[in-house]
Image (cartoon, grey):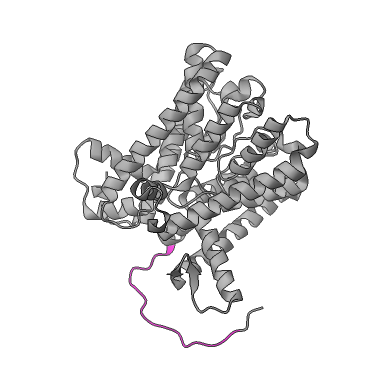
Amino acid sequence: MFSKLNRISPFQLILLSFAAIILLGSALLSLPISSAGGQATGFSDALFTSVSAVCVTGLVVHDTATYWSGFGQAVILLLIQIGGLGVVTAAAAVSLISGKRIHLSQRSTMQEAVSAPQIGGVVRFTGFIFKFTFAAELVGFSLMAPVFCMKLDFWKGLWYALFHAVSAFCNAGFDLMGINQPYSSLTSFVGDPLINIVVMLLIISGGLGFSVWEDIKTNRFHLKKYRLQSKAVLLVTLVLIIAPALYFYIFEFSDWDMTGGERVLASLFQSITPRTAGFNTVDLTAMRSSSLALITVIMLIGGSTGSTAGGMKTTTLAVLISSAVGVFRSKKDTRMFGRRIENETVSKASALLLMYLTLFLTGGFAISLFEGLPISDCLFEAASAIGTVGLSTGITPALGTASRAVLMCLMFFGRVGGLTFVFAAFTPKHEDLSRMPPEKINIG
């Protein structure tokens, strides 16, 4: 597969690979066998579903449980798995299993695809990704299977456990609980400790990033030996779980009709799931506007680099905060955990923030203009798409073609990554060694 594509850059290959899988998924979902009613699905609906699945988002125009057949659901699950791992990573695994030798140029593409710290050992790292992914999903499946088998028949219960385990680890947010009520997500499990805890742990596991898990495996409890990226990811993730959970517990769910246990679970779940997972255990439309605004911010941040999650990434936030702290303290360098962050990294983080905010605001305003809907709902939808989250206030199924196109572009951008898009389109053929004369400009 790789030998014919040596002339294009790794970023372009990643971009094209995602696009190819999306088109293939669209074709399969358009077939009559994919729908529960046995009718062919319109290409626009099939394309939107395929984009959402490959980009592990979870926004849907048809309820997954009631509209799609078993075959259609299997196609969606396969697209989620490929999208979560990364198309290039999946292709590399096929090459490894078949015994084909992976050359240096191919390893470079793999390094970009999995965000490996270095090209050396990237093949071994890819093997670790697959082992960890299937181990985590198997554990999640095993723990949830008894619950679903008790509520449904045996085989259907196993299928539901597998589907939700893969969807949760890949931070996709697709669910099959529409059998209770269309688009209901996991609201019927708001008080179920097992399902809540398993899904939350799968979301966190998939969203931390595989390089962080390799660091944990290697150094275990010796935190000082962790790479800087792992330390930043773990700290930001912990803060982004605890702080919103406390807000939801104190201010949002204090007057809801919940038991103490349900209130704790709901607070934690709604804190974790906006980080690109897309499940929900409470009715989002019943939440305060301030809570939805907080969820919007969390969705934009997303998961971590080299994970199954999308969004701006926790490392980007860590670098931006560290840079701001350095400026406030009149430091010449950006510092974090006793290490200096290169100026190039700070510049990339700033560029990413600008790109995500611009696309988020432009997408939200465009949908509001096309549909005549409140800007708050449209911005929420745009953040959900570009963060590859999948949460919605319920407006997705009724959106027109133009608005769906906006969401598909945002989902694709959010999953592939902003820098991948830019480097695929604008990477120069020759390095520019010239430098312009400096001149001071006042800021603030």
Q: Is residue 132 above or below residue 433?
A: above
Q: Is residue 383 left or right of residue 118?
A: right
Residue 166 visible to an observer of this rendering:
yes
Q: Is residue 253 left or right of residue 101?
A: right
Q: Position of residue 316 (x, y in %)?
A: 52, 60
Residue 32 visible to an observer of this rendering:
no
Is residue 287 in the magenta section? no
Q: Residue at x 63, y 43 (%)?
A: 271
Q: Is residue 349 above or below residue 200?
A: below
Q: Residue at x 61, y 60 (%)?
A: 358
Front position in the image: 39 or 60: 60
Q: Is residue 203 left or right of residue 186?
A: left
Q: From which residue to which does the magenta span run?
A: 426-441
Farthest residue toward the right?
255
Q: Position of residue 239 (x, y in %)?
A: 59, 52
Q: Is residue 78 above or below residue 424?
A: above
Front position in the image: 119 or 249: 249
Q: Quadrant of the N terminus?
A: top left
Front position in the image: 191 or 424: 191
Q: Position of residue 54 (x, y in %)?
A: 47, 39
Front position in the image: 326 or 276: 326
Q: Position of residue 230 (x, y in %)?
A: 44, 54
